[in-house]
Image: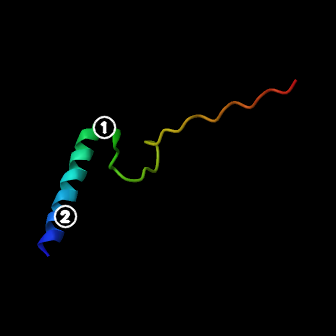
Amino acid sequence: MWKIAVAFVAFAAIALFVIMKAGDKVDMSGEKHGGDITHEPAPAPAEKK
């Protein structure tokens, strides 16, 4: 049983280390719905000659 607890603590420590090192590159705020989403604009249609 103690091995499971040690493995959990080790995994949690590694996960926190990776998240802290990533800095602003990781967005942990969940799904976005509304004006705060930024998508690339659709490409302009090509003109026919």
How has the structure been colored for display?
A: rainbow
In the structure shown, which secondary structural element does the residue marked by tag 2 occupy?
Answer: helix
The answer to whether 47 appears left or right of 19 in the picture is right
Left or right of 47 in this view: 26: left
Residue at (23%, 43%) from the top-left corner?
20
In the image, which disc is placed on residue 24?
Answer: 1
Most foreground residue, 4 or 24: 4
Q: Nearer the viewer, mark 1 or mark 2?
A: 2
Q: Amino acid at mark 2?
A: Ala
- Residue at position x 59%, y 34% in the image: 41
Residue 6 drawn at (x, y percent): 14, 64
Q: Which residue is mark 2?
A: 7
Amino acid at dot 1: Asp
Q: Secondary structure at mark 1?
A: helix
Q: Residue furthest front?
A: 3
**Relative to 34, residue 24 above or below:** above
Is 20 left, or right, of 45 in this rendering?
Answer: left
Closer to us: 41 or 5: 5
* Residue at 32% in and 49% down: 28
Q: Quadrant of the C terminus?
A: top right
At label 1, counting other C-alpha atoms closer than 10 Å, the crowd grade (few under 14, some 14-19, many 20 or more) is: few
State which tag comes first along the sequence, 1 or 2. Answer: 2
Q: Is residue 49 above or below residue 8?
A: above
Residue 29 image position (x, y, % from top left) = 33, 50
Distance in Å between CA atoms under marks 1 and 2:
28 Å
- Residue farthest top in this picture: 49
The picture places residue 27, in percent across and down from the top left corner, at: 35, 45
Q: How packed is label 2: few (under 14 Cα within 10 Å), some, or many (20 or more)? A: few
Q: Does 10 appear above or below 1? A: above
